[in-house]
Image (cartoon, grey):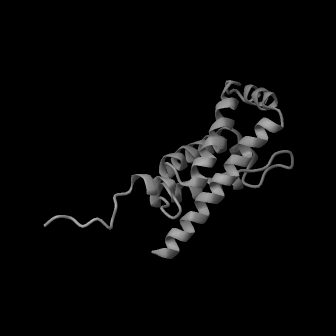
């Protein structure tokens, strides 16, 4: 059991960190560029703000272990959408101008694992919402 929780903790913190950084880069690199890119691929430009904010806030939530299953499910849907809308046409490894969907697939797999198994180790959500296991029940 300890090995599973340790593995889930590593996946949770890694996934959270990667998404947080991706969201931060969208803002630091000029969110208006991302807005324009969203428009160019047929998505409403304003969605760039929502995606970047979700990546940052959701990333932090995963790092601290808050709503792990929900955030992971939403990240999984985000990766599925990114793969189908943008990356599938360039292939698994890309086409020289754009990266392929190999990273998206890895992030999707990590998210799915966390949706299925959760992650309790060093998790704020587990501390807040778990029942006290040490309390004796009356007979």
Question: What percent of the width, then of the height, locates residue 68?
Answer: 51, 52
Question: What percent of the width, then of the height, locates residue 65?
Answer: 54, 54
Question: What percent of the width, then of the height, locates residue 128?
Answer: 43, 52
Query: Which image quadrant for residue 92?
Result: bottom right
**Residue drawn at 52 percent across, 55 percent down:** 112
Q: Residue furthest left?
A: 139
Query: Which image quadrant for residue 27?
Result: top right
**Residue drawn at 61 percent across, 65 percent down:** 10
Question: What percent of the width, then of the height, locates residue 107?
Answer: 64, 54
Using residue 18 as the reference point, say whether residue 76 is left or right of it.
left
Foreground of the two, 64 or 119: 64
Query: Which image quadrant for residue 22?
Result: top right
Foreground of the two, 135 or 96: 135
Work out whether 120 lies above or below 4. Answer: above
Using residue 117 as the reference point, say whether residue 87 is left or right of it.
right
**Residue drawn at 47 percent across, 52 percent down:** 125
Name the image quarter holding the N terminus. Answer: bottom left
Work out whether 49 lies above or below 70. Answer: above
Foreground of the two, 6 or 106: 6
């Amino acid at each position: 059991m300890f090995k599973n929780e340790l593995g889930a903790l590593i996946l949770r913190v890694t996934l959270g960190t990667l998404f947080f950084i991706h969201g931060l880069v969208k803002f630091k690199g000029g969110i208006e560029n991302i807005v324009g890119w969203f428009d160019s691929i047929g998505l409403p430009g304003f969605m760039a703000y929502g995606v970047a904010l979700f990546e940052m806030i959701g990333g932090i939530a995963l790092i601290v272990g808050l709503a792990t299953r929900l955030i992971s499910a939403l990240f999984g849907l985000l990766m599925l959408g990114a793969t189908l809308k943008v990356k599938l046409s360039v292939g698994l490894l890309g086409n020289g101008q754009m990266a392929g969907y190999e990273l998206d697939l890895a992030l999707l797999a990590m998210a799915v694992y966390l949706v299925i198994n959760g992650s309790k180790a060093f998790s704020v959500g587990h501390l807040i919402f778990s029942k006290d296991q040490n309390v004796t029940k009356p007979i």
